[in-house]
Amino acid sequence: MRHHRLFRSAGPAIAAFLVAGGLSWYSATAAPDGSRTSFGSSGNLGNGVVRTFASVDPGGAPAAVGVRVSAAALDGLPAEPAMLMLDFPPEASATAFDHLMLNWNPHGHEPETLFGKPHFDFHFYMNDMASIMRIDPASPGFATQAAHFPDTRYMPRDYVAPPGALASELAVPFMGTHWVDATEGMIPGVYEFTETFINGSWDGTFTFMEPMITRAWLLTEPTLQESIKQPQAYQKSAYYPTVYTVRFDDSAQEFEITLSEMVYRTGS
């Protein structure tokens, strides 16, 4: 297993965003208890549509951010990697998240023995698009920034970087370093990839949370709810999620990937 190649093939997909684009689509729905869900921008994927959302509780505090993927989006997908970059609605401004990067990987990505299945990467980014574009191997400071890992107190429990390579080789262009959950037993020939939860960083700062989900698993219309592993401390003050959920909304014919049960954390 070539750990230093983990996720490296995902970087060039940034070009797909330049042709895929996104569509503005802002709306909101209110529940009887006073909670509210607002939808952000949307984009076309396959034969369907993807749209971001954010929810607030009856008191107006952030409750969740997420993305809805229409069932039709799983059909008619392109044969080559594609990307959408979508804004969250303003209701997400008090959370840690800035926008969503969705990657479709029809051939999976390295290491193929683990992640070679067709799947989606849902990057919930905490930094803006301009910052992402500066994660460029052509930049003179790339190697130094890649070698600058977050302090261990900011590291979510059980998360590790793939060992055995220079730090600069762990960093994916236009994304950063991906951290994996060491407890999931990612052993080639043993690990069965359906979904997993990744964390990402760049230049000493955690920059994204990333559910990775196979198309085949989504087609089973799964229901999943699990706790998001937390660090000892946080780098900036914001609302952070503690629960990760995947579900299929039969009435709307949409898959929903949600980071929820937000808790306010003070940066230190």
Image: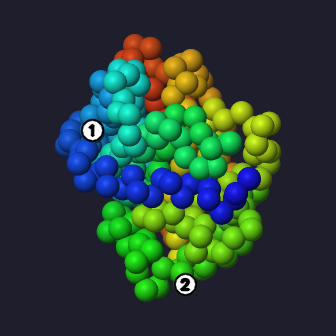
* Residue in view at x 66 percent, y 75 percent: 166
Q: Is residue 206 above or below residue 252?
A: below
- The answer to whether residue 74 is left or right of residue 267 is left
- Res. 144 mark: 2
The kind of residue on which mark 2 rests is: Thr
Q: Is residue 246 above or below residue 91?
A: above
Residue wearing tag 1: 43
Label 2's element?
A: helix
Q: From the viewer's perspective, is the residue at label 2 or at label 1 nearer? A: 2
Q: How many marks?
A: 2
For residue 15, say whether it is visible: yes
* Residue in view at x 56 percent, y 54 percent: 7
- Residues tagged 2 and 1 counted as in contact (Cβ below 8 A): no
Q: Position of residue 208 (x, y in %)?
A: 51, 58
Q: Position of residue 94 (x, y in %)?
A: 41, 58
How crowded pointer 1 is (Cα within 10 Å; few <14, some 14-19, many 20+) is rated as many
Q: Is residue 176 above or below residue 147?
A: above
